[in-house]
Each structure stands twice: as structure tokens, then as C-alpha cells.
Amino acid sequence: MLRYITRTHILVGCGFLLFLGAIYISSGHFSAFGSFCQTPADNPEPEDCSNWRFGDLKMQTGLKYAQPSTQKGRTDVNSVTNWNAPLVWEGTFDPVVIDAIYKKMDPRVAVLLFAVGKYTRFLKAFLESGEKHFLVDFRVTYYIFTDNEKDVPKIELGSGRKISVVTVPSATRWQDVVLGRMKWASITIDKQIRNEADYLFMMDIDSVFHNRFGAESLSQLSAVLHRGYYKNTKRDRFPYERRPRSKAYIPPGEGDYYYTAAVWGGYLEDMYKLVKYCHEQSEEDAKNNIEAVWQEESHLNKYLLYNKPTKVLSPEYLWSDYDHTPPDIKVVRISQLVKNYAEVRPNGGQ
């Protein structure tokens, strides 16, 4: 068959592919050459998306930084996934270069935090440490979802950084707080945050930053490896949802990594899609009188198995004060605090 393909066929074929590519790019879908910011269909004035180009890795002239090497680097860990996405560890990026590129884009970053009931006690340490280490010198808004607005502390914030409080109802079970995050996050993104941010992170409030958590974490969809399962755990030993009745079900023999739901982020529209997915799948489970084994974390892992993250962050991006730090964790960037779950959770941690 190949001998009958002429130059005309090739040109027509290439033209067709270019035509399809133009449609794909103009529709707002992911493209290596297209803008990732989307203009709403009902907006007659197109948004200026000139600064938001995937792959538009520009930085200022005259920047001084260490020359990159093709021969030296981390040899104790893997730094790329089998779908060729970066797996980020200390020593796999240059913070000077990364920050220069992303600061030129000047993104607006939203951080969604849920502090319901006694969890407001963790706000002060999270926010104060975040101001020291989280995307320093970037525009950041902390959206605090709480049933106790009076307990939100007054924190001195850096330039371009602010706090926005969202009132949510109280809960009688900690599981309802977890599942409610997806519901209230979806609603608030749709009504408010969509007009105020380019990137969005979901983070657990009972954590403290210890070191740089910077622009190397940003991508279309960034997921964090769970500290308990990142080394030698076989996929069939991951705590995926294994009951076929649940929408979060992952069959035996499938799986890449196990991701934590305590830190995850990405472009706002991609995060909205994922948050809404977790909420809707949880609602479907509820109709069938089942709750995924690890609530939204189970649905998150199901989604990310079939919709691969564009960047995977090592457990440096969420460690735990309960665990010792192994040699491959060179830097703990943020860590979950030791706490008495029976005391802080609404149903005693049960």
C-alpha cells in the first residue's frame, strides 16, 4: 500500500492534521502550543491570555545560575514517570531558573483550606509558615472554609497575598468534613475563585511548611506521592478502593502510584474538573449506600490513574511528623502535625 502514497496524499494528510490541531487548540484543550487559559463562551470580550502559554518558558536576560549537567544528578530516586512527566525531588530543578520563569508569568494562586470545628487551631501555624516558604513573592490567596470565622487569626501577609473567608456548615463526622470539601470547593470555584486565580491547590490545614515549596510544584495537574507507599509497595497493596460497588473502584493489577489527597494542585479549570468529579462520584456512591474507603482520596486516585498528572511531586511535598525522615527525603517542605485525632475530630476520629 505504501508505494501508492503520493506527495499529494502526504500534503493533504498534513493539512488535515494541521486543521485538526487548529480546532483542538482553539477549543481550549491542552496543547503543547496552545494557551491553557480559556475564554468563557458567554464572554464577548476575549480574555487576554498572552502570558499563559504551556511551554512558553521565558526568563529575563542576564540571570545568573549554575550550568545544568547531562551527567550529574539524583541517582538514588527516579525523576521521571513512565508517561514522561517530571517526578520532582530536591536536586532535580534549579529554584533560580524555575522562579524566574514563573514570576515572569505572574500567576494568581489559590490555596483552599478547610478549618472546621477545632481545626481552626492549625490556621496560625499553617499561614505563618506559608508566608515564609510557600510560593514566596507570588500572588497567593488563602481561601479559608470555616464554621468559626471569628477564630481565623490575623496574619501579616506579604505583598500581593491575602485571605478570603468562606463560611461553611459544621459537621458531626470527620468523614463529612472530608467529603464536604469537594462540594464546597466546587461551588466556590464556580461562583468566585474562577475569576480570581490561575492555579489552585487543595491543602490540609493541619500541616506546617518547613522549607521552600515553590514554582517547581506548578503544572497543569500536580499530584503528590503518599509518603507511606512511595518506595517498594506493590500496586496490589495500595489502599485503593477494591469494592466494585464504589465509583472509586480500581481493579487488581492496575495502578501507577498512590497519591495523597492532602496536597494536590493544577490549572484552575483542571482542578475544578477534578474536584467536581470527586464530589459527583461520592454522591453516586452515597446513592448506593457506600462510602469509598478513603473518601475523596480514593476518587482522586481513580481519576489520576486514567487521567495522568502532568507533574508528580515527591513526598517532600507532604511528609508527616509521625515518621522519621529517610535518606532519600533530602528536604521536608511541608509536614502533617502530630495530633490527638480523638480530640480534634468531631466524632472522636472514628
Image (cartoon, grey):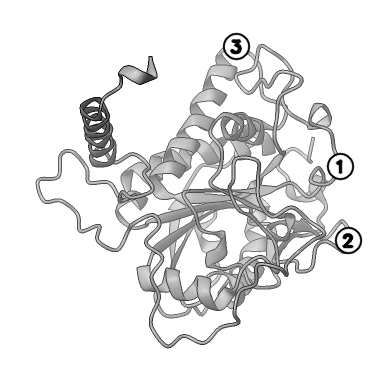
- The label nearer to you, 3 versus 1, is 1
- What is the three-letter code of the residue carrying label 2? Pro
Q: Which residue is mark 1?
A: 232
Image quarter hosting the N terminus: top left
Q: Residue at x 58, y 18 (%)?
A: 286
- Apparent side of residue 173 relative to residue 195 in the rendered image (left or right): right
N-terminal of the pair, mark 2 or mark 3, is 3
Q: Which residue is mark 3?
A: 288
Q: Tell me the element at label 1.
A: loop
Q: Residues within 10 Å of mark 3 (few under 14, many from 20)?
A: few
Q: CA distance from mark 3 to mark 1?
A: 35 Å
Q: Is residue 242 above or below residue 279?
A: above
N-terminal of the pair, mark 1 or mark 2, is 1
Q: Which residue is mark 2?
A: 326
Q: Nearer the viewer, residue 75 or 216?
A: 75
- Image quadrant assignment for residue 28: top left
Q: Is residue 312 above or below residue 281?
A: below
- What is the three-letter code of the residue carrying label 1? Asn
Q: Tell me the element at label 2.
A: loop
- Apparent side of residue 145 relative to residue 116 in the rendered image (left or right): left
Q: Residue at x 68, y 12 (%)?
A: 244
Q: Residue at x 49, y 26 (%)?
A: 280
- What is the three-letter code of the residue carrying label 3? Asn
Question: Residue 292, how many percent across, how many down?
Answer: 67, 25
- Apparent side of residue 11 relative to residue 82 in the rendered image (left or right): left
Q: CA distance from mark 2 to mark 3?
A: 42 Å
Image quarter hosting the C terminus: top right
Q: CA distance from mark 1 to mark 2?
A: 14 Å
Q: Residues within 10 Å of mark 1 (few under 14, many from 20)?
A: few
